[in-house]
Amino acid sequence: MSFAKPTTLSREQVAEFEREVNTIRDSVMNNLGQADVDHMRNMIRISRASEIGGRALLHFGVGPLSWVAGVLALASAKILDNMEIGHNVMHGQYDWTGDPALNSQTFEWDIACDGEQWRHSHNVTHHTYTNILGKDRDLGYSLLRMTDEQKWKPRHWFQPLANLMLAMGFQYGVGSHDLEIGRYKHGAMPKAEFKARLDRFLTKVGKVWFKDYLLFPALALWSAPRVLAGNFCANLIRNLWTYLIIFCGHFTEGVAIYREEDTRNETKGDWYIRQLSGSSNLTGGRLFHVMSGHLSHQIEHHLFPDMPAHRYPEVAPQIQALCRKYGLFYNTGSLYKQYWTVMKRILTYTMPPKRVPV
Amino acid sequence: MQPSPTTATRTTAHVLARAVNTPLVKALGHPWVESIVRLDAVEDALSALHPLLSLTQVRARVLRIVDETATTKTFVLQPNALWASAQAGQFVRVQLEINGRRVERAYSLSSRPGARRIAFTVKRQDQGLVSNHLHTAVSVGDVLTISQATGEFVLPDALPANILLLSAGSGITPVMSMLRDLKARNYGGDVVFLHVCRAPDDLIFAAQLQALAADFTGLRLVVHYDASAGFFSPQVLAQHVPDLNTRSTWMCGPAGFMDAISAYWDTQGFDKQLFSERFVGAPLLPSTAPGTPVQVSFANSGTTFTTSGTDPLLVQAERAGLTPKHGCRIGICRSCQCVKTSGTVENLQTGEVSSAPNELIRLCISTARSDVALAL
Ligand code: FES
């Protein structure tokens, strides 16, 4: 993966592109209404019902089948809560409703990542500086080397293993992301600041552990091991799934990476193009889109982060048509195909760069 | 001097409900409890069980809808046990969700304080989103969410000997409640109830007013129809009520009407007090031309600064030495989002100008187009 080539579009074309994208945005944003809120409330209800059902099966069910069903139900609840509900609500997609339960700035989710810290690392850093090397800290999550431009270090030999660990404990990866440990280690962050961030993160981890690994198992009395194992597996499934979707959104083949100096003075049109070429989509059915929090429409999400996500499928064909018109690459494919390219990248950059003879 | 409000009578059900739900809500609000079960989830479950059930909200079922005139309807409601009763003259905020958006409007109660059922009256406004919704989409059996009664426009505990209750149009509602209260308190003094409306067809509460007048000895009822009797001016008022200066007065009506009366009170130098309630037909907040100097107040921190120019509020606040929370500064991350309690702002990205109270705005892409108050 290399730095984005300067776009071949003229300034006028970029401006025209910007106008056309804005028109698509307005067509949806001007007709938000009851159907959108109903969709979100429905998702919340399904997630809650699924959590109650899952926990009930784990607590009171007998035999391995009910255990598996319980794990799957609880995992789905957590996936919905994190992706279709939490991620989207915290982006402010439903702030226009005025419903305090859907307020982006106060929403909190069932994951080891503190909502406030996520709002910072995700909404501020990642969505503003998408794919700018050195600024977008989601690039490899400061753990993986994903491009030639990142310096190779011996620890990158363990990259495939690190990738696996990150996938399994993804909620802790995302949760500790805003700590910016690297910056702290290099002395770029005062100790007090780091300590405050760490406390916040640990408190949140404490809360989710207390719930899943102490309180609910204890309530189950003699079924405690069954509940504990169930909760652990549900969290694990959720971690793997969110990792999978999120890695396919920005680390596939063909996703462009930017240098900071190239993004100075960018217009909204340039910004749109950067968001577009820095993201990749996944194809699938409605259930798949919902379970991915519509991050399967990562491109549309990065263009319109505050548009209710369930409207992305509606605008996607229009964006794709626009890309064809302007000769821009619309990166999309099946989950298998896209993840395969992610894996290829992770493995490729495990190796130190070959010295090119001058 | 504010009239000292009468202590609201509280029902046993209310006292009981408070005793149960105050500690419960407090416990559910604890961060560790909240991470296990969210208050929202409990609330949703309760309202699924029964629409009036709630730990935090006053909800009220519509029992009756009365057509008062061609353009006004009275909604008679049965509130749940969280309702703490009202004083005469107070209002409630009615909260509705219209096409997915939450909106709130204040309506004065017309019911007698302490009554088990409460009522408010709504005049249909031509462009009124909420009044039209209430008139067309709300029917008997529906449940509305309302606030507790609030407002300083109330009768005092110790009543003066002479009272004037003065209203125009749909401003009759709070003073109607006061009249009912006077009757219930066996008020022995002298009260004039003067109402102004266009024609007999527009008289709200016509039948109840007649019934009250019939067995309320101290009451003199005057209705001025300006279609037939001519424009109502303070001078006309003085003709109807020659002893104006002896009467403590409570009035409610359109802004122009109240302004004229207040001015008259001032020029005459009346020493009896004039209390008024202001939100009937509240005019839309004017927006100043871009760049005009305006006052921005941060209500929670108590700071205010004056600013001009068309820079975003975030930049202006920083220039004034404040440090509001922010992130991207380009409208994406919403870190700078806050509640604008009042005032008009322009969204610099869409050009949309809005003056709705209590709306969420992003400081980094909003500029003030009038004095603005922020909950920061
Ligand atoms: S600072 Fe990010 S939206 Fe205002």
Image (cartoon, coloured by chain):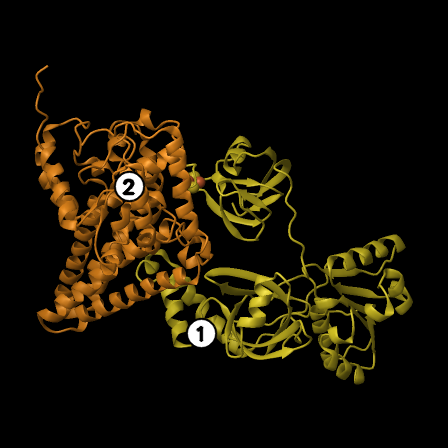
Q: Residue furthest top?
A: A358
**Chain letter of the yellow region:** B
Choose top left, top right, bottom left or bottom right for residue A102. bottom left
Residue B36: x and y in percent read: 30, 61
Q: Which chain is indicated by disc 1? A: B
Quarter of the picture containing the N terminus of chain B is bottom right
Front disc: 1 or 2? 2
Toward the viewer: A207 or A120?
Answer: A120
Horizontally, residue A217 falls left or right of residue B187, namely left
The quarter of the image that holds ligand 1 is top left
Q: From this viewpoint, is residue A179 visible?
A: no
Q: Residue at x 59, y 44 (%)?
A: B372
The local secondary structure at tag 1 comes to loop
Q: Residue at x 13, y 66 (%)?
A: A68
Q: Work out how far the residue at label 1 is from the one at label 2, CA to CA, in angstroms.
A: 54 Å
Res. B35 image quadrant = bottom left
Q: Which residue is mark 2?
A: A324
Q: Report if residue B245 is visible in the image.
A: yes
The amino acid type found where label 1 is placed reads Leu
Q: Nearer the viewer, residue B287 or A299?
A: A299
**Disc 1 target residue:** B53
Counting labels gives 2
- Say above or below: B363 vs A313: above
The chain drawn in orange is: A
Q: Is residue A312 left or right of residue A15?
A: left
Q: Position of residue B263 (x, y in %)?
A: 83, 54
User: Dot 2: what SS?
Assistant: helix
Q: Measuring from the top left, give residue A86's x and y in whole percent.
A: 32, 54
Which amino acid does the dot numbered 2 rest on?
Arg
